[in-house]
Image (cartoon, rainbow, N blue to C red):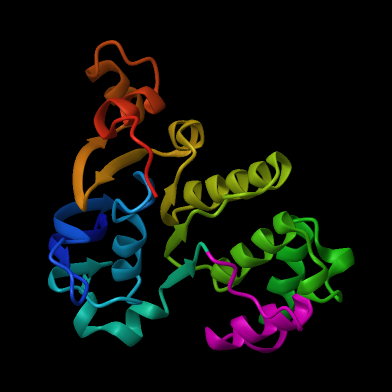
Amino acid sequence: MSTAIHINSLTKRYKDTDTLAVDNINMEIPIGQMYGLLGPNGAGKTTTVSMLCSLLRPTSGKIDILGKELSLNLNEIRKLIGVVPQDIALYDNLTAIENLNFFGRMYGMKGNLLKERTNEFLKIFGLAEKSDQKISTYSGGMKRRINLITGILHMPEVLFLDEPTVGIDVQSRTVIMEYLMKLQKEGMTIVYTSHHMEEAEKYCSQIAIIDQGSIIEHGVPDELVKKHTGCANLEEIFLKLTGRKLRD
């Protein structure tokens, strides 16, 4: 098996709306890819990722993850994936260690494995000395790093990230992206949404640009730059395809 994610005619219509949030998307993501899903605000990125990680039920269409149909194998697939949402999903009144122990147990981890993995990641992300402090005392960058650890603690085969580096300092962003690249090179499939075009162009092996619920372009970043005459980088391609009108 060489395909991590296969999407066929994926559609989502929210209740009491006429507009499709996701409109008949088809996508195939090979195992071991860093796949970027890019788009303006409201384009359908978060809705798509939410369906892929089973947090949201599609209106129609089919999702296969690691050769298994998601709707028929929810419990099994949830053990194989990791999810890092855009909103910080941590308990402010708990310490970093307490948060990681809680989320680790949710994934079935316990004992020495949970302890060793927790200590390892806290050290990697520069948080070991502050692991006994409550999350409420952490900076935005520190919270983002802990938020990421909760999604990779069990070393999933497929990792979904929704804006993992939004609103944080360059140092935290660099640490996060460099470690994600390490995981990808070791075989983890990573799907992430981002507004950082330069970041996506640097790290992603493939990208898809989504707007108004539809995929309007996809491919290898370098090849897309060659394809779109007059565009020097991914950001210029993005603006060419989605326009310069402000989005809310």
Q: Looking at this view, is 52 or 77 the one in front?
A: 52
Seen in the image, is 213 located left or right of residue 163? left
Which residue is at a point 24% across and 78% down the rendered structure image? 57
**Is residue 5 positioned above or below 220 on the image?**
below
Left or right, 162 with respect to 33, comes to right
Residue depicted at x 44% and y 31%: 201
Please indicate whether residue 71 sits to the left or right of residue 53 in the image.
left
Horizontally, residue 5 falls left or right of residue 192, namely: left
In percent of the image, x 26 and y 60: which residue is there?
A: 5
**Magenta stretch in the rendered image:** 87-112
Location of the N terminus (image quadrant) = bottom left
Decide which of 40, 37 is in the foreground and name it. Answer: 40
Inspect this view and state whether residue 141 appears.
yes
On whether residue 104 falls in the magenta region, the answer is: yes
Q: Looking at this view, is 213 or 84 the one in front? A: 213
Extreme-top residue of the structure: 230
